[in-house]
Image (cartoon, helix red, strand yellow):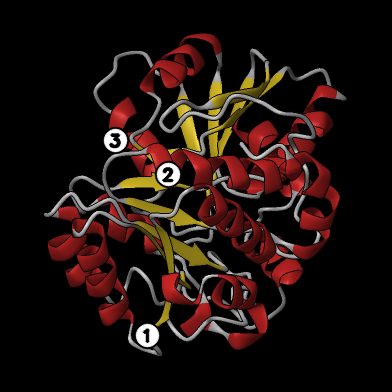
Amino acid sequence: MNKAALDKLQDWSAAGHRTVQADTLMMLAAEHPEVVALSADLTPTARLVPFKDTYPDRFFDVGIAEQNLIDFSAGLALEGLRPFAVGLAAMVPMRPAEQMRAAIGYMKANVTVIGLEAGVRFGPLGNTHYAMDDIAVVRAIPNFTVIAPSDPLSTHKALYACMEHEGPVYMRLTGGPGYPVLYPDDFDFQIGKAIEYRSGSDVAFVACGSLVADAAAAAEILESKGISTRVVDMHTIKPLDTEMLDTVFAENRLVVTVEEHSPFGGLGGAVAEYKAGLAGAPKQVIASLGDKFQRLGDHKFLMKENGLTAPDLAALAEANL
């Protein structure tokens, strides 16, 4: 981790995930000459203008051509560079799924694909800009790791972890302006190793992305009612931390998975797939965006519409306990 990150946390929280990833890519590029960044016509949107200006020979904007973004990134990786390819989560990975499978997954290329504005963060732009299925698409591609960090510092540390990771990574980013700070101090971030954010023995919220903060707030509501509540930051969705899940299944009476994604193929589906092979595992409830196209509205409205606010999550858990 770049130690300057701790000084930036409040600014990153105010600005949101785009600024976190852009500033972190600048830090990585300063430390590693093999780092290159690519964008699909998102240079200003992804806050990558400073990267372009500072490292003009290490930045590529391919235009509105997501398939080319992926093939180009794969070629750079196979030449020994470390590309970070930035696209909108609603477009990447869905549009270039074939290229992600054949050029990156099959080749085990060291490419990190970053999906901005995952979930329904782009509320006013409607369903064409909602990323409700990106985890499902990438989970089905062999060799890919899937990460959904929960706050500014975990996003920063996850990008550093991607730099050291061998093989393809898809990182979905949620959390716009007001990105909650869950980790104000340095902590250990390991790909594939979940974080127990708080302990508890009745309900266990297993969450990913910025909804970890809502799960933590829901836990406070339940604790005030005498319901002991665990919160797990399952930042890596593939591979799952099954050791953590074994602990949760052994010690909790109800599991609620929380994600800004479809109920199919995401975190809830991954947990359920693992749980299906176990005897005596507790009941699981999947809190998600549902199997539907969304109504038009801002992010706050859509979170309430889908029952993903802290009071809604607490009520869901209480009703199923």
Say left or right for 191 vs 24.
Answer: left
Q: Which residue is mark 1?
A: 62
Identify the residue at horizontal 74%, vertical 34% (top origin).
Answer: 183
Q: Nearer the viewer, residue 83 or 45?
A: 83
Residue type at tag 3? Glu
Residue type at tag 2? Cys
Identify the residue at horizontal 26%, vertical 74% (top origin).
Answer: 72
Identify the residue at horizontal 24%, vertical 69% (top origin).
Answer: 97
Across and down, in percent, residue 296 comes to 63, 83
Residue type at tag 1? Val
Q: Which residue is mark 2?
A: 162
Q: CA distance from mark 2 to mark 3?
A: 26 Å
Rendered image: mark on residue 294: none
Count of labels shown? 3
Q: Which residue is mark 3?
A: 273
First reached walking from the N terminus: tag 1 or tag 3: 1
